[in-house]
Structures are given as C-alpha cells and as structure tokens.
C-alpha cells in the first residue's frame, strides 16, 4: 500500500510538467489575428505580462491540483477500512498562511501590471502619425488629419489601415452610432469606440511583421470589431498594412490624388452615371474631371466633447480599386463579389437597410438599389479602375 | 409508528393536482417547482448553445443567420443566468434553507409563492417573444445605445421588461430568505452554527437586495429611452452610454457571486459528509464568502477596462479585482483541507464537488488574468472570456448544483439516484466540458471575438472550434444520462429507497423523513452545535476520531424532540393555508409587463394587469395566513 | 470520554415553538426592502448628478422655483410628524385619534403630490420635458419615481384608514401602522436628499 502511494508521488511532478507543457504549447498558437504573435511593442509588452501571469497561474494550479490528487489517493475509502478519521476542525496558522501567500503572489503581479498599464495608456512621445477612427455599423472609417491634399481635405479610407513601420501611431476614435471596439491583437489590446466619447489607442508596428504568410499577403495584420454592435458585428473587420516608410509615403501620395472621371462611352461611363445618380446619396469620392477636382457626395459633422469630427455616411470610394477587400474587410474585392454585392448587398453581409433613416443619420447597411446588369457591370468597371 | 400516524393527522397538505401546485405556499413544493422549471429552461438554453456551436463548427457556417444567431446567444445567456442558475439556487434555498435552520417554512410563504410565479411568468413572457417576431438580440448585457437603437422593434422591450420583473421576483425572495434566517432559526441555531449553505444563501440574498435596484433603474432608463423618447443614452444629445454599463455591472458583478456562492455552499456541505470530517476552517469559509460578497460590489468596472474610463479608475478596479482572489483562494484551500485526512467516498455528489473545485480553480485563475489590465484588453470580449466564465459558471456553479441534486435527491423523492449512471454522467460532463471550453481560451487569445456569428478562413481557429462543438455534444449526452437517471430513479421507481439518512449526513435535513412532512419537524429541534445531527450520532475518542454512539443505529435516527412523540404537544401546528393570490398577483404584473412591451396600445393590458394585481394584493393582505379550523 | 458530548446534547427545556412572533419578521423584511430602495434612489440620484448640467442647450436648473418647492417639502416633512402621532395613538389604543392622524398624513401627502403635479405642468409648459435633454430625463425620472412612492404611501394610508373604519382589525394592526410609518419616513428622508441634490446644490 505504502509503495503505491510513493510511486504516485513521483508521478505528480511529471504530470505537472507535462500539463504545463501542454498549456504553453496550446497557447503558443498563431494566426494573423493572434495576440500571441505580437507585431508591435505594445502587444509585445502585454504578451510578456500575460506569459508571466500564465506561468504563475499554472504553478498555482499544479500545486492545488496535486494537493487534491494526493488527498484523493491517500485518503480514499478502502474496502474494510472502518476506522473513522480524526475530526479536525481547522488550523488557524495554516489558514492564515494560505491567505497570505496568494496575497503576496498577487502583489507580485500587481506591480508590473500597473507599471505596464500606465505606460500603455500614455500618449506616445515625439513625432507620431495621427489617425482618426470613426466606427460605423458595420465598417471602419480612417482619416489621417495630418495628411491633406491640395484642397486641404485629409486622406480618408475605409476598413484598411495603412501604417509606416516603426513609427508611433496615435488613434483618436469615436462612433456615429453604437459602441464598437477597435482591436488589432498583434499590435495592441482593444479599445472601445464610443458614441459621445473620444477614446485613444497607440499602435506601433514592427519593421518586419511575422513573415508567416497566412494567405493575406505580406505585411498584413488582421483585426476586428470586438464589441457586439448588431447584425453584421462579425463582418466588421479590418486589415492593417504595414509598409516601409518609403512605401507608405508612396501610398499616401497615390491616395491623396483624386480619381479620374471617365471619358467617352462604354460600360465605365454608364457606371459613372449610375455612381453620380445613385451612389453619391451616401458615398463620397473626389473626382478630377474637365472642371477640376470635384467632391461628390457629402458627409456629416459629429461634435463630441467639444471636438468636431467629419464623418462619412458610407465608405469613401475614391480609391476603392486600391483596396483588397470591401464590406467591412470581410470580402475579397473580386469582380464577382462586387457584382453580387451591387445586386443585393444583404446577400453577402447581414444588414438592415430597410431601417435606414438617412435624415436622422441612421444607416444600417446598403440597400438593394435594384440596379440593372448593365449598371452593375459599369459600376464594377468604374470602381476597379479607381486605383 | 405512533409518530407516523400522528404526523398524518397534523398534516395539511392542501388541494392536490394542478390547483394544489398553483396555490401551494409550502416552501418544499415551491422549491421543487423552481427546480423543475430551471431544468426545463436548462434544456432550452442548452439547445440554444448547441445551435450556436453548430453554426461555429466551421468557418462561414450557414446553420444560422446572423439574426437568428444574435437571438440565440442573447437568449442563451439570459436563460442560463436568470432562468436556470438563479432559480436552481432558489430551488435549493427554498427547499433546504428553512429545514437547515430548523424552521417549518420561510418567513413569508405566500410571498415565496409570488416570487416563483413571477419568475415563471416573466420567463414565459420573455420566451413568448420567439413567437411574435423575434427574441431579444442585443446580448444579455444589452449595451446602450445598441439596445435603444431600434425603438420600433419590440425585441429588446421583452428584455427590459422581463429582466425588470425577474428582478422584482428575486428581491422578494431575497427579503424572504433574510427574514427567515434572521428570525426563524430553531433554538440554539446561532449564526455560527448555521450550515455554510445557509450562510451563502444569506450573502446571496443581500447581494441581490443591494445590486438589483441599480440595474432596475438602468432598465427603466432604457425603457424610457425606447418608448417615451428619453435621452438617457442618446449620445447626440450629450448623454453618456457608459452610464448603462456602470449600472449594469454594479448589479452584474455581484450577480456572478449570486450564481456561484450557493454552489460553493453546497460543495461545503457535501465535502465533509463524504470525507467524514468536519469542514476545515468553517469560520474562514463563512467569512471569506461574506468578504467575496462585500468586495464583489467594488470590482464591477473590471468589465469595462476597454471602455475608456480613464487609467486611474482602471488601475483601482484592477487591484480590487486581484484582492477578491484572496478570499476565493482561502475557500479552495479549506475545501482541500476538508478532504485531507478524511475517509473519502467517491459517490456522485462527491465527484461533482471535486470536479467543481478543479474547474473553479481554472476559472478563478483565468479570472486573475483579467485583473491584469493590459492582458484584459486583449482578452476582453473574446472567447477567452467565454471560456473563463463557463469554467466559473458551468464547471463551477452547474457542477456544484448537480452535486446538490445527487446529494439531496433522496430527500426530495425518498429515492437515491443511480450511482453508475451518476458516475457516467460525471465523467462525460467533465470530459465534454473541458473539450468545449478549454479550447476557447486558445481561440480567444488567437483573436476570435465573442458574439460573432461567423469567422473567415485561414485565421487558425477551425480546429479548436470543431473540438469545442464536439465537446458540446458530449455535454448533451452527459445530461441526457442525468435526465434518464432522474426518470428511472424517481418516475420508474427504480431508485433505491433512501430512508432518512442515506449519506450519514451531518445537518438537520437528514433527521426528518424523505420526503419531509409538510411541517418539516414534528418538534422544532434544539440545536447545540454546528453539524448538529453528526454530533447526535458520533462522539470523539482520545485521538479525536469519530466514534459512533451506542444508542443510535442505522439511518433511522429518532429526532430528539422537546416532549417526545405523544402528539398532543404539537397538535397545534398551523401551516399556512394555500392561496391563489400570489399566482394571481404575479399574473397581473406580467400582464402589465406584456402591455408595456406593446405600447401604446398595450396600455389596455397594463390597465387590466394593474386591476388584477391590485385585487390580488388586497385579497392577499386581508386573507388570514392560517384559516381557522 | 466518549459519552462526554452527550450531556451537552441533553434535551433542553420545552420552549414555545408554536407561533413565531411576526413583529421582528415583518420589520426585518421592511428594513431589507428599504435598504434595497436606497440603492434604487441612489442609482437615480447618481444619474441626475451625471446629467445635471447636461441640458442639450435647453432649459436647466434655473427653472426651479425654490420657495415653492421648499413649501411643498415642508408639507411632506410635516406628514412625518403626523405619521408619528398616528403610530403613537395606535400604540396607546386610541383608535379615533389614530384615524385622524392617518387621514392627516394622507392629506399632507396628497398636497405634496398636487404641488408636484403643478410643478411638472409648469416646467413642461416652459419647455423642460422628459425628451428635451438628459437633464430633463433624469429630473423627471428621479422626482417622478419619488412621487410614485408618495402615491403608493397615500394609497397604503388610505387603505388603513378605510380598514379601521370597516372594523377589520387584526391583532397586528399596530404593526401595520408601524411598517407603513417606516416606509413613509423613508420616502420623506429620500425627499430631503433629492431636494438638496436637485434643487439646492449649485451648478458646478
């Protein structure tokens, strides 16, 4: 009997180690949207803290579990065992000890937690790139207030955030409808995007984003809205493209240029007519035509805590063709997807356009506009051409 | 057997059949009603969860539409919290709290019936939404302004009204339990001789009393915004949507302890019985339970670390959250201390209790990772959090309540549940549970947000989602085994007759018949010690080992009474008479609630409901508690 | 040694296990209920404090007529005095006297309600409504729910008055007066807080 128990004791540490291994292995998972694969200093700090806590928690679990297992094996009722146990009511010294030990462990965790917490919540020092993030049901609007075109209009894009590597970026965020949450796990924790409030988040991407290619292209990091925001919450995603500073500047230059108004006839001209007639009710575009650069469509201004934010009603389409995705970064921007979307957007993404009230600023998705095949073809041509 | 005959004479069981159940004011019958209702809702909530898991089995699942998915996960959360775990806790509390303190009923038997019927009718009201255009779909937390956005869609009104009414029911039953504990204990039953389960029920009652009104106000505000053009959560008018989150979580966090503490109480009853040792450090367990309840009011904002409160407030709530881990740890160590040195019998209640401890430790430790604020900003609103609270509320609370069912089933029905089926249930549940919720930790850390009805390919989430779905079906099988065990043991009468004291118990419920007579105790017991019944059966020898006392044998221990069993002494037991007013009053209130959902023409139903409930309340207050014979 | 604990468990002398005294039971429940009510009003007062300067560009606290509301507050405070007198009379067994004071309390409560209705209609006339601003929403909700509590109190007092007329008297009727009294005093005390926070506190 005694030998069995002793052999059992040797097994426990082995089991514990194996368990620790399994847990750590399981948690070293990966993916383009994983918090365990940091691609920036903030996320790396958080990851370090998380790993410290994980190790401590695993040690505690192993100790507790070992205690339980030992008790269960040693003190199980055996056949023929009729001796009653000693009626022990407690042991104050022991109980005080195991009150204090967890308290000490927690204090050990608390110090780096608070240190990191305040550091992460600080504004970045020195030069930074400012980006305004507006949450919409169900897409992201990104504006770069410091990067303006000849007319003074800031660079505006949707769902795909482009960043220069190695430069601190400071997001200023608010929402025009319900609460969203901006989350790109490899770069930083999430921060809610709240109507009537301004929230901030700092991001900084490493020069080399994990080289592993998950099928999303090089330098691409995935993110997603993390606060339940209604029907298409699952399809309110976003992508971050990390460029070298030079590539980023080139991208900015392309984006600041207006789109070209098509000339002549053909599908693309039909598309442009439809665009002006239908799409501009919500969408915006800067188009250079014979009469100079024209701004099609209009947005709204939202006042939050004394700050004014220019927000669109729907994604700006000036450089739609340069984006790899659309519809809340949920669909690859292929012609086929685009045609299906234009035929009936709710067919691809769950939305409630029947409840739109544009005058009241309530937009719950793009309605089925009843476009003809020709109009759809024309629009696809047009949008693809707007690189 | 003079005692039996005498008992029959003094019983006043009241009408049988449906009317009997509808008018019952017997705390035991009401407890059973709670249990059966909670079991039915558990089945419904489980089916909802399985549908969700089927949808998530693979990327871009097409089992459910986004709309259906949002309704199902909202109703799953609402059901499991308000219509399953709270009522199953209420079932145990109703049935056993009076018996454990040596009382014949709760302080207000009719108020008790009112609480049950209000709970049932409110639950049915919320569920009726499925039949009339869709269930609430704004998540169980109903964050504003999403929950106030579509005023013309009544789904979220079912939620505001239903939750409000459920809150009223809980406040009423909590006041009842508090009054019972404070004023109806048997002679000698001092506060520190009360079983831990009673203590935890008391703490829970206080938590509900002081937390529910906060969310009640929040729900009124949402309702006013939705129906009367109020501006409590209108950001465009300068209102602050975070107010709702504060009001909700001031309730919502204590609510977590409301769900778990009674389960901790049950485990604290089961462990000593099956270890044949007293609870290790009873005062530590009791006071740490009270401390958890108290500190529980100061940590609500850890649900809001990403909402933009301000770094100082976040730091404060983070530290408070770490502090609450200390009393929780104390409980776990003391439970292990209870088994240490005992003679452990691995009956099913014990298995589930040990499972509870192990799973709760995991849930508690992942909870500590949430107090690490930066880490929480990654974990918040992901499957990691889903994993965490299921380890606390399923592996924790549900395992605890299932332990309670196996433990007390013989007292309810007079028959034991089958042990082999029970063990099968336990192992399937443990494996299924860990397969379902273990992988969710990894999914969350790898970036899968909760409340999303589909996910794309190549995100590295496919494998663990499949495992989780398979695990969910194993849980289903395990609970089908459980259901069969109950059917076969009770309804098919295959269960072994239990007698009074099948487990060699320690507390007062095992001194009385199974099932207990209407008046519980022929004579109100005199209490001399914690674990009163154990001390009547066992003394201690020089070594401190328990020694069976010579004058009592077997399980059928005669209750020590004041005056023997000659009948005359207790010929004047007056149990409260059945009353239909409680059910009528709650029907009236729920009619009003249904009317409020469908304003403005619902005002008619509001009026009708008001008249009905006024009538019932007046009839109730004028009706004598015990009719003269 | 083995028998030692036995002595401790010897049957105690008989005790009255028949009827529990309902006084402590009901009073406990009432106190618990009032504790719950504190949180109820606390949540509304917090909301009001959050929104008290949030007038959405419309009417704010300048609309308050402090002398008028002070007068109606005084009326409500006096009703607590008459409630005490009613309770005292019941205890003293003077049912007639008690009836008079009950009626007086209900009357004072009704006067307060009338004042509140007048005040609300004035404010609405001037443009402060439930839907004009978060301030308006919070103001009407807080004072309105308090008014509803007063109305319930008046209803309870009226019922007790009628019951005493109809001769439906129970052993514990003094207790019911006491319980209604507890509730009534609570509603008065809450009003003192509301009056201070809503009407008297200076805008930040």
Image: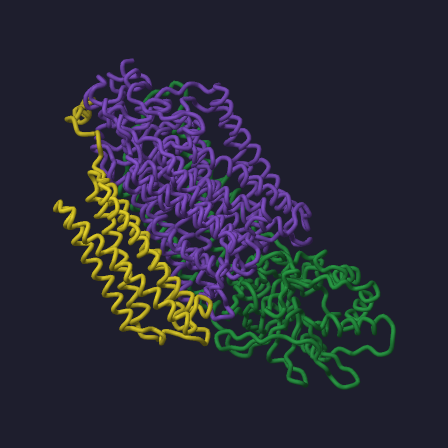
Chain colours: A green, B purple, C yellow
Q: Nearer the viewer, residue B295 or B492?
A: B492
Left or right, residue B235 beside residue A215 = left
Q: Is residue A102 above or below residue B30?
A: below
Place residue B567 in its image quadrant: top left
Left or right, residue A152 beside residue B33 = right
Residue A333 point in image, percent of width and height: 74, 63
| Residue B352 can be seen, yes or no | yes
Residue B355 point in image, percent of width and height: 46, 36
Residue occupying image coordinates x 53% and y 26%: B484
Place residue B310 in its image quadrant: bottom left
Q: Is residue B139 above or below residue B120?
A: below
Residue occupying image coordinates x 28% and y 62%: C112
Q: Is residue B599 above or below residue A285?
A: above
Residue B620 point in image, percent of width and height: 33, 39
Residue occupying image coordinates x 72% and y 68%: A323
Residue occupying image coordinates x 14% and y 49%: C89
Q: Considering the image in quadrants, where does the N terminus of chain B appear? A: top left
Q: Nearer the viewer, residue B164 or C110?
A: C110
């Amino acid at each position: 009997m005694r030998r069995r128990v002793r052999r059992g004791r040797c097994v426990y540490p082995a089991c514990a180690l194996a368990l620790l291994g399994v847990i750590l292995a399981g948690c070293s998972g990966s993916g383009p949207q994983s918090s365990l694969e940091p691609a920036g200093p903030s996320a790396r700090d958080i990851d370090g803290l998380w790993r410290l806590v994980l190790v401590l928690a695993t040690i505690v679990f192993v100790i507790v579990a070992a205690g339980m297992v030992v008790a269960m094996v040693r003190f199980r009722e055996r056949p023929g065992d009729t001796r009653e146990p000693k009626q022990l009511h407690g042991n104050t010294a022991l109980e005080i000890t195991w009150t204090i030990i967890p308290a000490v462990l927690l204090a050990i965790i608390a110090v780096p937690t608070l240190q990191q917490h305040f550091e992460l919540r600080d504004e970045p020092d020195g030069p930074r790139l400012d980006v305004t993030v507006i949450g919409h049901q169900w897409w992201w609007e990104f504006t770069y207030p410091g990067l303006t075109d000849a007319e003074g209009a800031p660079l505006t894009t949707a769902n795909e955030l482009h960043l220069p590597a190695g430069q601190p970026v400071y997001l200023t965020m608010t929402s025009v409808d319900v609460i969203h949450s901006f989350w790109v796990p490899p770069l930083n924790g999430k921060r809610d995007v709240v109507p009537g409030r301004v929230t901030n988040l700092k991001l900084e991407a490493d020069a080399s984003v994990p080289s592993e290619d998950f099928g999303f292209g090089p330098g691409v990091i995935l993110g997603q809205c993390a606060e339940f925001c209604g029907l298409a919450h699952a399809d309110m995603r976003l992508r971050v493209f990390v460029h070298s500073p030079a590539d980023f500047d080139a991208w900015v230059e392309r984006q600041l240029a207006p789109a070209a108004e098509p000339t002549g006839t053909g599908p693309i001209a039909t598309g442009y007519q439809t665009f002006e007639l239908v799409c501009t009710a919500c969408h915006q575009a800067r188009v250079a035509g014979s009469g100079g650069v024209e701004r099609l469509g209009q947005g709204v201004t939202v006042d939050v805590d004394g700050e004014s934010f220019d927000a669109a009603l729907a994604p700006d389409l000036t450089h739609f063709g340069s984006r790899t995705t659309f519809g809340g970064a949920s669909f690859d921007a292929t012609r086929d997807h685009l045609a299906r979307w234009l035929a009936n957007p709710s067919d691809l993404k769950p939305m409630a356009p029947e409840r739109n009230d544009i005058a009241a600023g309530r937009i719950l998705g793009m309605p089925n506009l009843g476009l003809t095949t020709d109009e759809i073809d024309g629009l696809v041509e047009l949008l693809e051409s707007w690189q | 057997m003079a005692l039996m005959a005498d008992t029959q004479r003094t019983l006043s069981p009241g009408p049988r059949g449906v009317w009997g159940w509808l008018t019952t004011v017997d705390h035991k019958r009401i407890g059973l009603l709670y249990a059966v209702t909670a079991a039915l809702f558990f089945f419904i909530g489980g089916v909802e969860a399985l549908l969700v898991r089927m949808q998530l089995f693979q990327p871009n699942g097409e089992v459910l539409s986004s709309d259906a998915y949002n309704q199902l996960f909202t109703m799953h959360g609402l059901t499991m919290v308000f219509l399953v775990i709270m009522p199953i806790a209420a079932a145990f509390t109703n049935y056993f709290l009076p018996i454990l303190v040596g009382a014949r009923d709760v302080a207000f038997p009719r108020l008790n019936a009112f609480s049950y019927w209000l709970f049932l009718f409110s639950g049915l009201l919320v569920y009726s939404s499925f039949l009339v255009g869709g269930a609430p779909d704004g998540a169980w937390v109903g964050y504003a302004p999403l929950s106030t956005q579509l005023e013309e869609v009544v789904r979220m009104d079912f939620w505001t009204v239903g939750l409000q009414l459920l809150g009223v029911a809980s406040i009423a039953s909590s006041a009842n339990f508090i009054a019972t504990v404070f004023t109806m204990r048997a002679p000698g039953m001092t506060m520190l001789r009360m079983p831990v389960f009673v203590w935890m029920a008391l703490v829970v009652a206080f938590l509900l009393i002081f937390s529910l009104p906060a969310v009640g106000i929040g729900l009124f505000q949402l309702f006013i915004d939705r129906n009367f053009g109020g501006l409590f959560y209108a950001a465009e008018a300068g209102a602050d949507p975070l107010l709702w989150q504060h009001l909700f979580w001031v309730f919502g966090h204590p609510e977590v302890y409301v769900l778990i503490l009674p389960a901790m109480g049950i485990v604290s009853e089961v462990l000593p019985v099956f270890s044949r040792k007293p609870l290790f450090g009873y005062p530590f367990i009791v006071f740490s339970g009270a401390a958890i309840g108290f500190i529980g009011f100061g940590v609500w904002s850890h649900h809001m670390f990403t909402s933009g409160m301000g770094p100082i407030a976040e730091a404060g709530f983070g530290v408070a959250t770490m502090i609450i881990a200390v009393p929780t740890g104390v409980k776990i160590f003391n439970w292990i201390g209870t088994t240490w040195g005992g003679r452990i019998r691995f009956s099913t209640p014990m298995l589930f209790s040990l499972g509870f401890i192990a799973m709760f430790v995991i849930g508690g430790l992942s909870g500590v990772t949430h107090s690490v604020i930066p880490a929480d900003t990654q974990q918040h609103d992901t499957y990691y959090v889903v994993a965490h609270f299921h380890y606390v509320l399923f592996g924790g609370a549900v395992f605890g309540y299932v332990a309670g069912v196996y433990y007390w089933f013989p007292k309810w029905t007079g028959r034991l549940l089958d042990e082999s089926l029970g063990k099968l249930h336990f192992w399937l549940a443990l494996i299924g549970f860990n397969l379902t919720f273990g992988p969710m930790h990894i999914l969350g850390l790898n970036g899968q947000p909760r409340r999303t009805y589909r996910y794309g390919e190549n995100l590295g989430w496919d494998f663990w989602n499949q495992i989780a779905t398979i695990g969910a079906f194993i849980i289903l099988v395990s609970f089908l085994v459980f259901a069969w065990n109950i059917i076969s043991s009770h309804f098919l009468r295959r269960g072994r007759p239990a007698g009074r004291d099948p487990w060699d118990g320690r507390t007062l419920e095992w001194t009385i018949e199974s099932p207990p007579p209407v008046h519980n105790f022929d004579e109100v017991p005199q209490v001399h010690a914690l674990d009163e019944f154990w001390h009547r059966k066992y003394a201690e020898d020089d070594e401190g080992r328990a020694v069976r006392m010579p004058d009592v044998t077997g399980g059928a221990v005669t209750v020590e009474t004041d005056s023997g069993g000659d009948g005359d002494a207790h010929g004047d037991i007056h149990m409260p008479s059945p009353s239909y007013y409680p059910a009528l009053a709650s029907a009236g209130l729920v009619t009003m609630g249904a009317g409020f959902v469908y304003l403005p023409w619902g005002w008619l139903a509001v009026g009708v409901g008001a008249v009905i409930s006024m009538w019932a309340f007046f009839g109730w207050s004028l009706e004598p508690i015990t009719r003269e014979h | 040694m083995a028998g030692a604990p036995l002595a401790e468990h010897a049957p105690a002398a008989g005790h009255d296990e028949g009827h529990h005294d309902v006084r402590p039971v009901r009073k406990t429940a009432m106190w618990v209920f009032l504790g719950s009510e504190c949180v109820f009003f606390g949540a509304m007062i917090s909301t009001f404090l959050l929104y008290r300067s949030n007038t959405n560009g419309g009417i704010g606290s300048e609309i308050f007529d402090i002398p008028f509301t002070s007068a109606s507050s005084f009326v409500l405070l006096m009703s607590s005095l008459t409630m005490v007198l009613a309770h005292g009379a019941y205890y003293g067994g003077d049912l007639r006297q008690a009836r008079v004071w009950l009626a007086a309390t209900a009357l004072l409560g009704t006067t307060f309600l009338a004042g509140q209705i007048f005040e609300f209609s004035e404010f609405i006339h001037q443009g402060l409504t439930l839907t004009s601003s978060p301030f308006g929403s919070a103001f009407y909700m807080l004072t309105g729910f308090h008014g509803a509590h007063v109305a319930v109190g008046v209803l309870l007092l009226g019922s007790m008055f009628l019951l005493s007329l109809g001769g439906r008297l129970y052993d514990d009727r003094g207790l019911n007066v006491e319980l209604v009294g507890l509730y009534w005093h609570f509603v008065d005390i809450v009003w003192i807080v509301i009056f201070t926070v809503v009407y008297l506190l200076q805008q930040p």
